[in-house]
Each structure stands twice: as C-alpha cells, then as structure tokens.
C-alpha cells in the first residue's frame, strides 16, 4: 500500500513538472516581457536591469529552475497587462471565486441530493420524470445561457436579485468576504445558482442511476425478505451504498467548476479568478495564463491523488481487492 | 393426508407466470404442498424446475417479470397471499425467515453486522436498543461465531464465506419466525464448510423446533436434513414423500431417474451413474400432458393427453398415471 | 403446405428503405430531432442565399434599431423577430450566425476526428511505447476541462499571432482550439477498436499477402471502427457548437463584427437590462434548440449502435 502511494505521488509530481515546463515554455517564448513591463521611454540601464532580474540572458534550463524555484516561494512573475505581480492579482481575486464555488456547492448538495434521491426511489413517478427532464436541460444548456435566462427572469423582470458585482464586501484583512452582508448574499445567489446548474443535473442523474442499481441488488432483496420498512431500506441501506461514488464524482468535477466559473464570472461581472483568466486571454497576458494552467493542473492532480489514496482506506473492500 | 395436526404452511395451486414478449409463460403450475409444524420439507429438483421461484412466491418477493397469479398460501391458519404490503412486511422475517443462497452478495457491505441484526430484530419485536443488541449478540453466539462482540462491529467483507452464511442464518432467525425457507443455503460455499452449515441448520431446527422449507438440488443434503421431500419438475410437483420412502421406493419415474443420476455408492459399493435421456423442458416448452412424458419409459397415451393431478396415497403424493411398483427391499 | 415463394430480392429491397421508416416510427423523439436539425440547417444555409450579410453591408438603417418582435406593441411585419441595436433584421442575422456556428462546429469536429483518429490508429496499431506515450498525454489532457483548454490554446494563439487578426484567422484559431481540446475521446475509441481488429484473421491475411501497414489500416481496419466514432462525433457536434458559442460570448472566439450565435448573444446581452430582451433570447433559443436536438439524436444513435444493447431489439 505504501509502495503504491509513493509511486502515485511520484507520478503526480512528474506530471506537474511537465505541465510546469509547458507553462514555462509559453512564458519564455511567447510575448515580449520587456515591451510589456517597461514603459516606452525606458533607459538602456533599466532594460538591462530588467533582463538581469528576469534572468532573460540565462540558458533555458536555468531559467526553468528559477521559474520553479520562484513559484515555490510564491513569486509567480509579473502580469504583462498590469505590470503587477501575478501573486497579488491572484490573492486579490481568490476570495471571490472561492466563495462562489462554496455557495454553489451548498446549492448542489441542498438541491441536487434530495432531488436525486427522489428520482432514484420513485423513478417512474410524474415528479421524478419531471426532475429528470429538468436535469437533461441542466446538462445540455450552455452555462452562459442559464445565466442570461436567470438574469432575465430574476433581475430584469422580477427585480429581486442583482445581476452583477459582489454586493457589499467586508474586508477581513487577508480576505474580502461577501458572505457577511445581506447584499453580499443576494449578489452571490444568481451566479452560484448558474455555476451549480451542471453539478445539480449531474448529481441528480448519478444518484438516480446509483439508486436504481442498488435497488436491484441481492442485499436489498434480502433486506426486504427480512421485513425491513421501505423507508429504512431506501434511506439507510440503499443510500449508504451510493454516498462514496457520488462524493468521489463531485470531487472530480471540480475541474468543470473551474472552467465554468470563467463563464459565470463573465456573465455576472464577478471579480474572481475566472474573470482574471479571461482578461489575461483577451490581453494575451501569458504569465497569468501560464500560472492558471499550472493551477488547474495542480488542483485536478491533487484531488485525483487524494481520492485514489483515500478510497482504499474508506472502502476496505478496495484495499483487499488490490492485495 | 394422515396427519391430524393442521399444517403450518399450506400451499395450494400456487401458480406463477412470467411476462415475456410473446405473452404469458407459466413458471409454476398449480403447485401444492404443505409443511407440518416442526418438520423439514425438502424441495428438490433440477436447475430451472421452479424451486427458488416457489420460495420467493411464498413471501411475495418475486423479481418482475415473474408474478404470482393463482393459488392460496396459508400460514398457521391465516391467508398470506392477499395481505397488504404493510402486513406482508411483518410476515417477512417476523413469521417466515428466509436464508439466501450467496453470502457474498446477500449482506449490505456498508452496514455493520450488528446493525443489520438489530434492525431486523427491532423491525418485528418490540425491544429497546440495548435489548435488541443483547439478542443480536446472543444469536451471533448461537450460530457459532467466536467473539460475538467483536463480530458485532464488523463489516461483512471482514468475514469468510462460511461466517457470512452463519450471519445470514442468524438474520433469518433472529426475529423468531415460525417457518424458515432456506434457498440453496450451502450451494455457494466451499465443500468443507457446507457440512458445518448444514449441521448448524439442523441444530437450530432441533433447538427451537422451527419448521423449515429446504430448497436444494443436492439429494445428499435432502437425505441428511429433510423429513419429507417434494420433487419439482418443470414447474410442477412430481412427487411428495417421506425421505426414506423417496429414496427406497420412489413412485414417480422421474424421481427414480433423479436418484439414479446422483453419484452414490450402491449396496455393493460400486458407483452408479445413470443419466435420464433428454433434458427438462425450459420455460414455455412444456409438452402437453405430463411434463416428463417424452423422457419416461412408462409413458402411454393418457400421459400425453392429460396433466396427471397430484394423487394422495397413504403417506405420500405423486402426479403420475403409471407410478412405479413398490419394490420390497 | 404453402408454396415456397422465392422473394429474397424483393424482401431485401423493401427492408432497406422500410427499415429506416420502421426505425423512425419506433423512435418518434429522435426522429423529430432529426427533422428539427434538418430544418435549422436549411434555415442557416438557405436564408443567407437570399439576403445580404447584415454585418458586412450597411443596407440597414439605424432608424430601424430596437424594433421588438412583430407580435409586440411597436413591432412590424418587416422584422418578425425584431431588430438589434444596429437595425439588423434578427432573422437574417441569426441565419448568418447559425451558419457560422455550424460551420465552425463541423470543422472543429473534423479536426478533432482527424487528429484523434490518427493518433488513435497509431497508438492502437503500433502499440508499445508509442501507445503508452500517446495515452499518457491523453490522460493528462483529460485533467483539463475542454473549455479551459480551448481558451488556453486560443489565448496562446492570439499572443503568437498578434493583435491584428482577420476574421478568417480568428475562425481558424477557434476551430483548431476546439479540435485540439476534443481529440482524446476519438483517439481512445479508435484505439480500442483498432486493438480488437488488428488481431483479427483478416488483418493477418492481409499482412501475409504483403500489403503495407498503411493500406491495411486505411482499407481494412478503418471501415470497421467508424460506426462508434461517428456516434461520438454527432454528440460532440453539439458540444463543439456550445464551446464556440461560449468562446465567442466571452469575446475570445469569433470577433463581434462577424456573426456567430455566440457573438449575437454577447451583443444582445448588453441590452438585456434595458428591456430589449429579444436580441439575445432568440439566438439563445436557437442555439439551445439545435444543440438539444443534436444531443437527443446522438444519444439515440449511441443506444442503437451499442453492441451490448443490440440483443434487445
């Protein structure tokens, strides 16, 4: 088991290194950092200073090592667009996106789980089929269409919720939160709902399939043969079997959330990492793009690794099968 | 029927059909038998004869597209084939226990054994949590599991196949039912374990006098455990006899063929193995008249014309127009 | 005894055309979707033949701007679905937009298919280290949501090609980005099919007769692996179009000056708050209609061609 864990960790590190190298190549070869970071009337000295500071005169491998070294110390380079350190930009925008993801996760659990359970227990009921229809819409509709429709209904027509911005934000020093004010919550509701649409639809479908499968299993049949109540059979005996796969899939969906947050933040003018990324693409801001590339890879690889390593501990059957 | 006590379980004309694309096909055709209090009735037959379907039909746990479409089932004087789902739930486990075949798939993998036992006990008996736990531990001990308090907290996958089947038996009996239906309880187990499990079943039967319906294809198990035996063929009852009579003086030609086809040493010590020519008809391919007639050496015109009814004689019953002559040993 | 009539030929002919009709009757939903897709295709490609591109010619007048759909208060029969902020007839604008979206969608699916198909063929046929390498790359790429990848490739391409880009270049960038982002699924499917086929007898037979590897792949194996791939391609068409619309909506796809459904929605979004909802809602609905139909049809085809389900029907 320890061997397996060690090898998986090493593999993950290698992949991250490769991704970092690709990101580094982007930074090294695309765009002109001098033109981007210096003003037009910079002196020759200033140019030389910057070249030395950025290490542009060094061979490729040295620059790559510096790149990695800097990243590990929290220095992510400078944005070509704003000349600010990328780390600052990220720190500024991170809370907004994290809170958005958090609230959308809440919505996913609060809406998706009960709906999915209902569909799994009563798959052929009218309400169950209705929920499935909506979930099909949720899976196929593009994220920005959902956002626009929500704005059209709740902002324009009903005037209930704002369609842009974070509302009133409380500054806690290192973290600006919108979750401590009513206006903050009102502002986060629509974007979080939009972001969660895909997840809710996905979890409904997954729970339904899982429950229908479990419902056919021998141990559920035996539970029935022992006269246990339907409520106990479904809500305890069946559901416990579906929890782990569902939680795992949700974790692995994190990549999708990150992708869709770009769209959602754009529709709702939400000042988070997603809109930072979008601006960097529009402005050909390579350093930011590169860091984002590494960041997404890191998130996905780490989650995958954690899931792979934790699964055998949670589900001892997997461990036995592996040995 | 000579018994003076009323039977515990009385099944009459039980019919089960399966809904196939072409139409309705009969899986069980007017099966009738009874079980007396405290006795072990073996239900034996080849694969596909309808043994498991019979067990599932009695507690209304047939898997669709199978459906119970006829007959009456009476348990201790009350009809149980027309009960509401809620009433049926209290019968299942509470009055009729069921032992499933495969211990690797019958137990819920994510719930502890102790919890599964307590849930079953509390579903039928009005006991507090701690009383239920005590009873559960008691049962774990009775079925021969060492260190019951340790096993209580374990999950099924932490136990071997044999131990799991003991748990299954405990689960079937823990709510003190009056009848237990065991569907091939040892088939999925290692040969070395089978004997122990059968012993356990026999001991429990003797201790509590719970009646048993033992479904199996293995005549050896029947010989060891059953008091009376019902032989099923193609969804119909061929013969019902006390176990000694069945082996020594079978009435139905199929029964004799079945016994002969089982490798068993003869009185002289040789191993005999005679296969019955042909094969049992599958669902929907039952020939007119007696289902066995194409393979029967005693078949005559009336066998092909009419389905022989179950004929009761002395201590046994058989459905054959030309039963075997009694051979005095 | 009924006479044995020799009707195999007639029976065969009837069955080929009749089979399609029979299949259509048994699946009314997907058939309807196919009809809808066909209608939208006609709309997208025929309407532009009869009207000028409202984004290239200034035939429309600003006086005509913001006219609501014909059934509303200030609507006019000249503009059944209304006009946008520049006075463009939405019906024409959407037709051109739909056309661009569909073309981009098809092209990117083709690129993905060709790229993924070639890599899958090579991986499956050659095997060994080459196969392991290609699959490893595929695995790593799968870590990234396709949308994100398309954005990154798009962004990098923009940086390389500089700020001044023609519409054609922009379109090419979008097509390539989406194609590269989506090659993995094709590669995997073709690879597993090829691995099954390459061990078949007919391949050994072809080898023995001295045919080159390439011709074996193209002439023998390819026809056998196309069916599942085409099913994936159908489903991916919907995803490709949505991805293009998303990229254009975000402003990093097709430029706003030349229409695709995404740019139309982006443009219309500016006026959503002030009440001119129709400018973005019609393109939204059209997009959704097309993609949902493609998805339902694709799902149906996948079930029909699923070898595991074949026994059932």
Image (tube, rainbow, N blue to C red):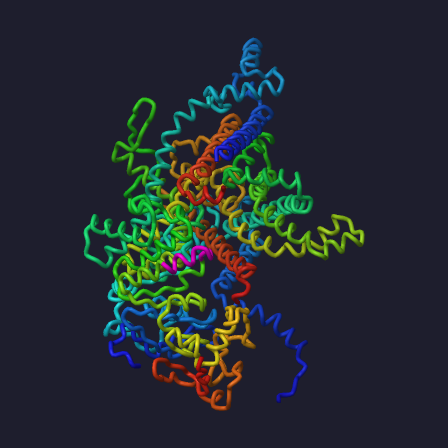
Query: What x and y, as percent, mark residue A149?
Result: 38, 47
Q: Quadrant of the C terminus of chain B?
A: bottom left
In this rendering, would B59 be left or right of A75? Answer: left
Residue most extreme to the front: B268
Q: Main secondary structure of the magenta part?
A: helix
Determine whether C142 is above or below B46 in the image: above
Question: In x, y percent, where is residue C283?
Answer: 46, 49
Q: Residue C241 placed where, x, y %?
A: 52, 48
What is the span of residues highlighted in magenta in the rendered image?
B189-199
Left or right: residue C279 versus residue B89 is: right
Residue B198 is inside the magenta segment: yes
Residue C240 located left or right of residue B221: right
Does A286 sit left or right of C204 as displayed? left
| Quadrant of the snapshot with the N terminus of chain B | bottom left
Relative image position of residue C199 (x, y in whole percent): 68, 52
- Total labels drawn: 0
Residue C214 in view (yes/no) = yes
Q: Which residue is at the front of the view, C313 or A10? A: A10
User: B6 or A33: which is nearer to us?
Assistant: B6
In reply to whether residue A146 is colored magenta, the answer given is no
Viewer-closest of A125 and A220:
A220
The answer to whether residue B252 is above or below residue A308 is below
């Amino acid at each position: 088991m320890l061997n397996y864990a060690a090898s998986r960790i090493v593999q993950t590190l290698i992949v991250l290194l490769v991704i970092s190298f690709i990101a580094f190549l982007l930074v090294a070869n695309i765009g002109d950092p001098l033109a981007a970071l210096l003003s037009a009337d910079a002196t020759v000295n200033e140019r030389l200073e910057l070249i030395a500071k950025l290490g542009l005169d060094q061979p490729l491998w040295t620059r790559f090592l510096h790149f990695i070294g800097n990243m590990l110390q929290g220095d992510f380079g400078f944005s070509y667009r704003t000349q600010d350190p990328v780390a600052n930009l990220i720190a500024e925008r991170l809370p907004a996106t994290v809170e958005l993801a958090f609230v959308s996760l809440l919505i996913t659990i609060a809406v998706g789980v009960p709906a999915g359970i209902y569909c799994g227990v009563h798959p052929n009921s009218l309400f169950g089929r209705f929920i499935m229809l909506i979930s099909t819409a949720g899976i196929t509709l593009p994220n920005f269409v959902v956002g626009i429709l929500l704005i059209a209904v709740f902002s324009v027509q009903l005037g209930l919720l704002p369609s842009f911005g974070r509302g009133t934000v409380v500054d806690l020093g290192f973290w600006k939160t919108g979750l401590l004010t009513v206006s903050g919550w009102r502002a986060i509701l629509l974007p979080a709902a939009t972001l969660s649409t895909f997840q809710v639809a996905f979890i409904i479908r997954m729970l339904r399939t899982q429950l229908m499968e479990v419902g056919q299993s021998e141990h559920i049949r035996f539970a029935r043969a022992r006269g246990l109540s339907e409520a106990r059979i479904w809500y305890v005996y069946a559901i416990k079997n579906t929890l782990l796969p569902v939680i795992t899939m949700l974790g692995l969906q994190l990549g999708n959330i990150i992708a869709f947050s770009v769209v959602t933040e754009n529709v709702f003018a939400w000042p988070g990492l997603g809109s930072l990324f979008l601006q960097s693409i529009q402005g050909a801001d390579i350093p930011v793009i590169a860091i984002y590339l590494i960041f997404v890879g890191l998130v996905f690889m780490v989650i995958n690794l954690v899931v792979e390593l934790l699964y055998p501990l949670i589900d001892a059957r997997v461990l036995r099968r592996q040995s | 029927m000579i018994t003076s006590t009323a039977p515990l379980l009385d099944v009459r004309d039980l019919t089960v059909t399966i809904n196939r694309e072409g139409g309705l096909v009969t899986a069980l055709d007017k099966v009738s038998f009874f079980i007396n209090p405290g006795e072990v009735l073996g239900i034996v037959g080849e694969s596909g004869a309808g043994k498991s379907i019979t067990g599932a039909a009695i507690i209304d746990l047939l898997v669709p597209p199978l459906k119970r479409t006829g007959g009456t089932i009476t348990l201790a004087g009350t009809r149980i084939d027309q009960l509401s789902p809620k009433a049926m739930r209290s019968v299942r486990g509470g009055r009729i226990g069921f032992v499933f075949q495969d211990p690797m798939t019958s137990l819920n993998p994510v719930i502890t054994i102790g919890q599964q036992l307590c849930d079953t006990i509390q579903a039928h008996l009005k006991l507090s949590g701690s009383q239920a736990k005590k009873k559960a531990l008691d049962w774990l001990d009775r079925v021969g599991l060492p260190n019951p308090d340790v096993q209580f907290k374990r999950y099924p996958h932490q136990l071997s196949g044999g131990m799991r089947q003991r748990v299954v038996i405990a689960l079937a009996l823990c709510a003190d039912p009056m009848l237990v239906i065991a569907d091939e309880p040892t088939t999925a187990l290692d040969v070395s374990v089978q004997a122990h499990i059968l012993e356990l079943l026999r001991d429990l039967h003797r201790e509590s006098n719970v009646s048993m319906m033992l479904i199996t294809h293995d005549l050896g198990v029947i010989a060891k455990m059953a008091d009376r035996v019902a032989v099923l063929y193609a969804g119909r009852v061929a013969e019902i006899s006390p176990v000694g009579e069945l082996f020594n003086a079978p009435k139905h030609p199929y029964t004799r063929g079945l016994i002969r086809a089982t490798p068993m040493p003869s009185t002289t010590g040789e191993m005999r193995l005679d296969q019955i020519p042909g094969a049992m008809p599958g669902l929907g391919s039952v020939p007119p008249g007696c289902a066995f007639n194409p393979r029967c050496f005693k078949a005559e015109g009336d066998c092909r014309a009419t389905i022989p009814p179950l004929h009761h004689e002395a201590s046994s019953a058989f459905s054959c127009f030309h039963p075997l002559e009694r051979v005095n040993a | 005894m009924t006479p044995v009539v020799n009707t195999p030929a007639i029976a065969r002919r009837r069955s080929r055309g009749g089979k399609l009709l029979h299949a259509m009757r048994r699946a009314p939903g997907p058939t309807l979707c196919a009809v809808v897709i066909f209608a939208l295709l006609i709309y997208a490609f025929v309407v532009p033949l009869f009207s000028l591109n409202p984004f290239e010619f200034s035939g429309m007048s600003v006086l005509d701007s913001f006219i609501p759909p014909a059934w509303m208060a200030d609507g006019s029969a000249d503009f059944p679905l209304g006009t946008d902020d520049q006075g463009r007839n939405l019906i024409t604008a959407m037709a051109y937009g739909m056309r661009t979206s569909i073309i981009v969608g098809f092209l990117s699916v083709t690129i993905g298919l060709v790229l993924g198909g070639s890599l899958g063929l090579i991986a499956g046929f050659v095997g060994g280290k080459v196969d392991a390498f290609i699959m490893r790359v595929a695995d790593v790429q799968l870590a990234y949501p396709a949308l994100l990848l398309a954005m990154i490739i798009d962004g990098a391409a923009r940086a390389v090609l500089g700020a001044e880009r023609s519409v054609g270049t922009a379109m090419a960038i979008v097509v390539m980005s989406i194609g590269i982002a989506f090659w993995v699924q094709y590669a995997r499917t073709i690879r597993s099919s090829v691995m099954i086929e390459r061990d078949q007898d007919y391949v050994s037979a072809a080898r023995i007769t001295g045919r080159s590897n390439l011709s074996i792949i193209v002439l023998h194996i390819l026809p056998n692996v196309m069916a599942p791939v085409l099913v994936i391609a159908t489903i991916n068409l919907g995803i490709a179009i949505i991805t293009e619309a998303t990229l254009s909506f975000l402003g990093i796809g097709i430029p706003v000056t030349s229409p695709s459904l995404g740019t139309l929605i982006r443009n219309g979004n500016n006026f959503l708050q002030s009440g001119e909802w129709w400018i973005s809602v019609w393109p939204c609905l059209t997009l959704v209609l097309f993609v949902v139909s493609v998805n339902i049809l694709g799902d149906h085809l996948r079930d029909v061609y699923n070898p595991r389900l074949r026994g059932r029907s």
